[in-house]
Image (tube, rainbow, N blue to C red):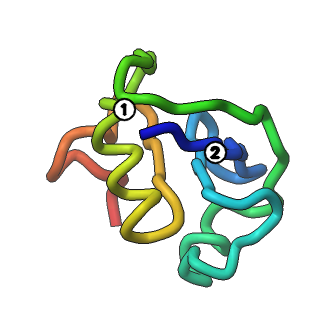
Amino acid sequence: MKKTCYIYKGSREPDTYLFMEKEDDCSMVPDELLSMLGKLELVMELELTQERRLARADVSTVLKSIKDQGYYLQLPPKYAHPGSGPPN
């Protein structure tokens, strides 16, 4: 499977990236998440395949999330594990 995705960073959450299936199409991203991220800025366009390695995410997980939801949210390393999210 080969998939082109568009990676955005938000103005409010450092080191948090949103991988989207379509460029400039946030229709699949929940409004609360968009609000949390702030203004989105395109960082890069990336071709994903099962063979590609990503620095902070498993490519299979990213591809599945993009296929199922239309996007993948990459959190900073300190929040990447379940139960270790930001304080309420």
Tell me what residue is drawn at x 41 percent, y 16 percent.
Answer: 53
Instruction: Please tell me whether mark 2 sits on a helix, a strand or a loop.
Output: strand
Give left or right: position of 37 versus 39: left
Q: Where is residue 18 in the image (x, y as percent from the top left)?
A: 59, 50
| Residue holding disc 2 | 5
Instruction: Please tell me whether mark 1 sits on a helix, a strand or a loop.
Output: helix
Residue situated in front as seen by the camera: 7 or 80: 7
Residue situated in front as seen by the camera: 50 or 6: 50
Specify few, some or many for label 1: CA neighbours under 10 Å numbering under 14, 14-19, or 20 or more: some
Q: Where is residue 5 in the image (x, y as percent from the top left)?
A: 64, 45
| Residue holding disc 1 | 59
Residue 55 to residue 73: above or below: above
Q: Position of residue 13 (x, y in %)?
A: 62, 48
Q: Quadrant of the C terminus?
A: bottom left
Q: What residue type is labelled 1?
A: Val
Mark 2 or mark 1: which comes first in sequence? 2
Q: What residue type is labelled 2?
A: Cys
Residue 45 to residue 71: above or below: above
Cα distance between the residues tagged 2 and 1: 12 Å
Tell me what residue is drawn at x 42 percent, y 62 percent.
Answer: 67
Q: Residue 29 carries which label?
A: none
Give left or right: position of 45 versus 14: right
* Residue 25 image-quadrant placement: bottom right
Give left or right: position of 14 versus 45: left
* Residue 33 image-quadrant placement: bottom right
Specify few, some or many for label 2: CA neighbours under 10 Å numbering under 14, 14-19, or 20 or more: many
* Residue 51 image-quadrant placement: top left
Q: In which quarter of the image is the N terminus?
A: top left
Identify the residue at the far left of this view: 83
